[in-house]
Amino acid sequence: MSDPIDVPIDDDAIRLGQFLKLANLIESGSEAKTVIAAGLVRVNDEVELRRGRQLQVGDVVAIAGHTARVGTG
């Protein structure tokens, strides 16, 4: 797995579905729903099935060999 890229956010938290799009890990919100429901997304090395999961600064999201870390804006 690759080293995570840092993706800054403007607030203290962001929903998983929004972060996947912001980090360019997926193309659309509908794709987020599909890949999350299929169990293809990991947060901090644990499978996450909730699109609305609140991510905090420092959380690491992985999908298909790509990783992104929530950073400060």
Image (cartoon, grey):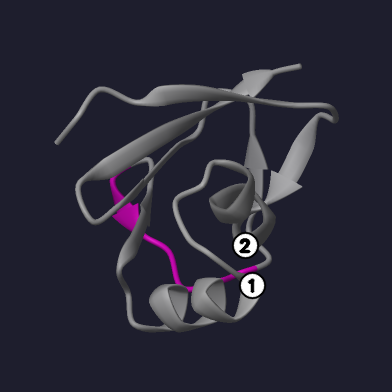
Q: Position of residue 43 (x, y in %)?
A: 41, 48
**Location of residue 30 with respect to 18 vertically, above or below:** below
Q: Nearer the viewer, residue 23 or 60?
A: 23
Q: Which comes sooner in the sequence, label 1 or label 2?
A: 2
Q: Which residues are magenta?
A: 45-51
Q: Quadrant of residue 36?
A: bottom left
Q: Is residue 61 left or right of residue 3?
A: right
What residue appears at the point 14 percent right and 36 percent down from the top-left corner? Answer: 1
What residue appears at the point 47 percent right and 60 percent down from the top-left corner? Answer: 26
Q: Nearer the viewer, residue 23 or 45?
A: 23
Q: Secondary structure at mark 1?
A: helix
Q: Is residue 70 left or right of residue 9?
A: left
Amino acid type of the residue that numbered disc 2 sits on in the rendered structure: Gly
What residue appears at the point 20 percent right and 47 percent down from the top-left corner? Answer: 65
* Comparing labels 1 and 2, the label whose residue is closer to the camera: 1
What residue appears at the point 83 percent right and 27 percent down from the top-left corner? Answer: 10
Q: CA distance from mark 1 to mark 2?
A: 7 Å
The residue pinned by badge 1 equals 29
Res 47 label: none
Q: Position of residue 66 (x, y in %)?
A: 28, 42
Crowding around mark 1 (Cα neighbors within 10 Å: few <14, some 14 to 19, many 20+) is few
Amino acid type of the residue that numbered disc 1 sits on in the rendered structure: Gly
Image quadrant where one finds the C terminus:
top right
The residue pinned by badge 2 equals 17
Q: Position of residue 32 (x, y in %)?
A: 53, 71
**Location of residue 41 with respect to 59 vertically, above or below:** below
